[in-house]
Image (tube, helix red, strand yellow):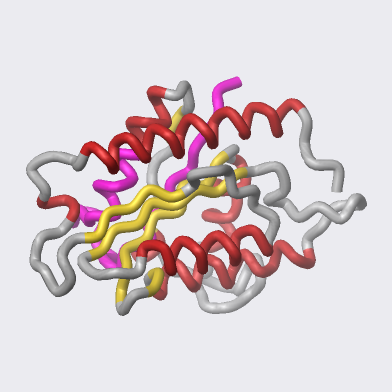
């Protein structure tokens, strides 16, 4: 069975017809994951959905989070993509992490959350500082709700502070970004295969 990667795009752009730099980073990482033998699921753009605020797995009528939850938990690896705004992950990213807080109360008889033995990696873009701070915030939050973080789990690009060039506008993906994406993919796919064969005991 191939390892499945589910990308989630936390751009603030709700119109899926408009490309975002987060899409571009997910594409770079997706190429690396496919080269490592994984299968990429279609990207979920959260801003295009009606994701209700809250900390449960279903916030009632019209809430589209339950469908997202099903897809991310069906995959082996969550690719969590976010832009940097005001030095932090986007508000969409924070809302998604808040919804995953529900995992704390959804454990099996061995105390394992539904995300146990599944991996999470991040792709981050921005035109300001904040990549390390954002990945630290995301990794701690996702680890708290059961996701496994492999070594070298973040691939990021930040442009000149207050600059006008976005990642998607670069004429060529920087070599370091491509190299890091490959490392993220190889490590995550390797660990996902191990955990598929031998999940955490709880």
Queried whether the magenta region covers residue 179, the answer comes back as no
Residue at the right extreme, as displayed: 109
| Residue beneath the point at 60% across and 60% down | 142
Q: Residue at x 16, y 51 (%)?
A: 168
Q: Nearer the viewer, residue 88 or 132?
A: 132
Q: Is residue 55 left or right of residue 4?
A: right
* Residue 59 figure quarter: bottom right
* Total count of labels: 0
Magenta part of the protein: which range?
1-29
Is 187 placed above or below 20 here?
Answer: above
Q: Residue at x 59, y 78 (%)?
A: 54
Left or right: where does residue 49 sit relative to residue 201?
A: left
Residue 113 picture location, percent across and down: 76, 55
Residue at 66%, 71% (x, y): give it: 56
Q: Is residue 9 magenta?
A: yes
Q: In terms of depth relative to the viewer, which is nearer, 158 or 167?
A: 158
Give the side of residue 38 with respect to residue 162, left or right: right
Q: Is residue 117 above or below residue 12?
A: above
Q: Position of residue 176 (x, y in %)?
A: 27, 41
Of 50 and 184, nearer the camera is 184
The quadrant holding residue 143 is bottom right
Q: Nearer the viewer, residue 7 or 191?
A: 191
Q: Is residue 197 above or below residue 74?
A: above
């Amino acid at each position: 069975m191939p390892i499945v990667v589910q990308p989630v795009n936390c751009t603030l752009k709700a119109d899926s017809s408009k490309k975002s730099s987060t899409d571009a980073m997910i594409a770079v990482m997706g190429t690396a994951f496919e080269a490592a033998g994984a299968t990429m699921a279609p990207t979920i753009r959260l801003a295009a959905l009606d994701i209700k605020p809250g900390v449960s797995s279903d916030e009632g009528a019209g809430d589209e989070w339950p469908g997202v939850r099903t897809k991310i938990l069906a995959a082996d690896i969550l690719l969590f993509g976010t832009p940097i705004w005001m030095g932090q992950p986007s508000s969409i990213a924070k809302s998604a992490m808040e919804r995953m807080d529900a995992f704390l109360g959804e454990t099996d008889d061995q105390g394992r959350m539904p995300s146990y033995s599944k991996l999470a990696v991040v792709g981050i873009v921005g035109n300001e500082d904040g990549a390390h701070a954002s990945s630290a915030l995301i990794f701690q939050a996702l680890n708290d709700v059961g996701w496994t973080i492999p070594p070298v789990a973040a691939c990021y690009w930040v442009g000149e502070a207050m600059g006008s060039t976005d990642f998607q506008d670069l004429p060529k993906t920087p070599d370091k970004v491509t190299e890091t994406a490959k490392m993220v993919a190889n490590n995550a796919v390797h660990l996902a295969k191990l955990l598929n064969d031998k999940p955490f005991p709880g």
